[in-house]
Amino acid sequence: MRIPPYHWWRTVFFLIPAIAIYTIVLGSASIVSSLIDRRGYFAHRCARVWSWLILKTTGVRVTVEGLDRITPGTTYVFVSNHQSIYDTPVVFASLPYQLRIIAKASLGRFPVLGWHLRRGGHLFVDRIRPDRLGILRRWRALVSDGLSLIIYAEGTRSPDGHVARFKAGSFLLAIQAALPIVPLAIVGTRRVMPKGRLRTEPADVRLIVHTPIQPPVLERPTVRDAVALADRVHAIVANDVETLQNGKTTELQKG
């Protein structure tokens, strides 16, 4: 019988209980605050503290590059690759913006975490029956409050470390909302905890913030317009991941 490695024991008996405590305490604080703070600003501060604690406890060291390329106080759509469940703590702890995410509807059913997301103004998408008009309506309400959005455009975590082709749906919404898109490349979280592995390991992670891209001004944007924009952003993000994480300079993986 093979004995699990040290980091498995550390994850199961130390890290998971610690994160559960962080989630219960800070999630409860954010839920209570939402009774007064309808915009979810304090809830977001709780999320940033939660993220920082998770990274610190796990031993994840994040280097952020390119923050000078974006303007504080501006509303953005941040579009990132998705390598690990650790991507969200990295983004929330590193970007000094009021962020909201588009999450799969099943997350909303989780105790505490789901309640925090719903009360904090995050958006949920039913992947089987997506309500694009409803999402756009709620998105515009967030924009009016000066909140930025974070999107994992692959739709799910990468199973192999490559960046899958970005889905066009969220880019169609970005064109309709007329908000600048900021490509984000997250490099290294796969070493912390890849998809399908119940074990975390300390690692160095890089978050690269690219120059914002202004979507084209179109009265009636089409899916083709959204695909073109998605491919443009994908090329930027995938280049960083393939070069810095996978050691490749050949043609980028697209699916």
Image (cartoon, rainbow, N blue to C red):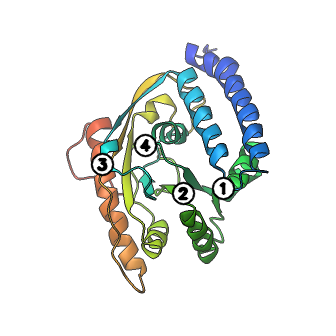
Q: Is residue 163 among the parts visible in the rendering?
A: yes
Distance (Cα) linking label 1 and label 2? 9 Å
Judged left or right of residue 151, residue 44 is right
The residue that disc 1 covers is 39
Task: Name the kind of residue labelled 2 in the image.
Answer: Leu
Which residue is nearer to you in this view: 242 or 49?
Answer: 49
Front: mark 3 or 1 = 1
The residue that disc 4 covers is 160
Distance (Cα) linking label 3 and label 2? 18 Å
Q: Secondary structure at mark 4?
A: loop
Provide residue 9's location: percent of width, then percent of height. 63, 16
- 27 w.r.t. 36: above or below: above
Q: Secondary structure at mark 2?
A: loop
Front: mark 3 or 4 = 3
Task: Name the residue located 48 percent from the left edge and 42 percent from the top edge.
Answer: 91
Judged left or right of residue 173, residue 23 is right
Instruction: Verify CB contact (< 8 Å) between mark 1 and mark 2.
Output: yes
Task: Name the residue located 33 percent from the left edge and 66 percent from the top edge.
Answer: 214
Q: Secondary structure at mark 1?
A: loop
Q: Indicate which disc residue 147 carries.
A: 2
Task: Name the kind of residue labelled 1 in the image.
Answer: Arg
Distance (Cα) linking label 3 and label 1? 27 Å
The residue that disc 3 covers is 69
